[in-house]
């Protein structure tokens, strides 16, 4: 059972998408949802229990780097000093990555997978720390108009509704 959803965003575009996620919450969904910046005390996220769902929306910018505000959160979870079971019995997570393959040299053969290093790394790291993945990693590309975002948001809210009713 979920008690609430927190959409954690890193980057201006990520904030816009986070707000879109909140707006598209289904009318019948009773789970409260809020947004927060990724650089707002990332360590405090460890205080959240398994009834909380964190939806990370992170932007990858040039050279595969996170945005400034997204970087604080990513660096926190990437620390090598964290125990491998750090997230066991903690929050559930979902990750949506936003990238731009126009920033890559070989634009002709690149996809959303090639320009979302930050989201892919965070998703893998949260899993490696014992986190419970709520839904599949989402990857979107600005070059294609972020067409991957809408279907991911729909699937995200569908999975939240299923968890709420179980």
Image (tube, rainbow, N blue to C red):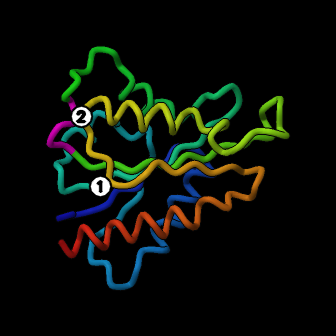
Q: Which residue is mark 1?
A: 53
| Separation (CA) of disc 2 from disc 1 | 15 Å
Question: Does 86 sit above or below residue 97?
Answer: above
Q: Main secondary structure of the magenta part?
A: loop
Q: Which numbered dot is residue 156? A: none
Question: Does 50 sit above or below residue 131?
Answer: below
Magenta run includes residue 88: yes
Q: Position of residue 67 (x, y in %)?
A: 59, 35
Q: Is residue 8 visible?
A: no
Q: Position of residue 104 (x, y in %)?
A: 78, 32
Residue at 48% across, 31% down: 121
Q: Position of residue 128 (x, y in %)?
A: 31, 29
Q: Say few, some or many: other residues with alpha carbon within 10 Å of mark 2 (under 14 / 14 to 19 / 20 or more).
A: some
Determine contact: label 2, label 1, CB under 8 Å. Answer: no
Residue at the far bottom: name it: 28
Q: Quadrant of the C terminus?
A: bottom left
Q: Which residue is mark 2?
A: 130
Residue at 62% across, 40% down: 113
Rendered image quadrant of residue 102? top right
Rendered image quadrant of residue 35? bottom left
Nearer-the-camera pick, 89 or 15: 89
Relative to 50, is 9 on the left or the right? right
Magenta run includes residue 117: no
Rendered image quadrant of residue 72? top left
Q: Say few, some or many: other residues with alpha carbon within 10 Å of mark 1 (under 14 / 14 to 19 / 20 or more).
A: many
Q: Position of residue 14 (x, y in %)?
A: 57, 51
Task: State which region is magenta.
Answer: 86-90
């Amino acid at each position: 059972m979920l008690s609430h959803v927190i959409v954690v965003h890193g980057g201006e575009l990520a904030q816009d998408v986070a707000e879109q996620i909140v707006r598209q919450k289904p009318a019948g969904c009773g789970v409260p949802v809020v947004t927060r910046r990724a650089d707002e005390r990332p360590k405090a996220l460890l205080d959240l229990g398994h009834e909380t769902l964190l939806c990370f929306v992170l932007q990858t910018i040039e050279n595969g780097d996170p945005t400034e505000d997204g970087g604080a959160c990513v660096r926190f979870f990437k620390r090598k000093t964290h125990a491998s079971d750090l997230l066991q019995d903690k929050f559930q997570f979902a990750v949506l990555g936003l990238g731009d393959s126009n920033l890559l040299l070989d634009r002709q053969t690149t996809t959303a997978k090639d320009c979302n290093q930050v989201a892919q790394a965070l998703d893998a790291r949260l899993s490696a720390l014992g986190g419970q993945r709520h839904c599949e990693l989402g990857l979107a590309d600005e070059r294609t108009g972020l067409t991957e975002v809408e279907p991911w948001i729909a699937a995200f809210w569908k999975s939240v509704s299923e968890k709420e009713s179980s």
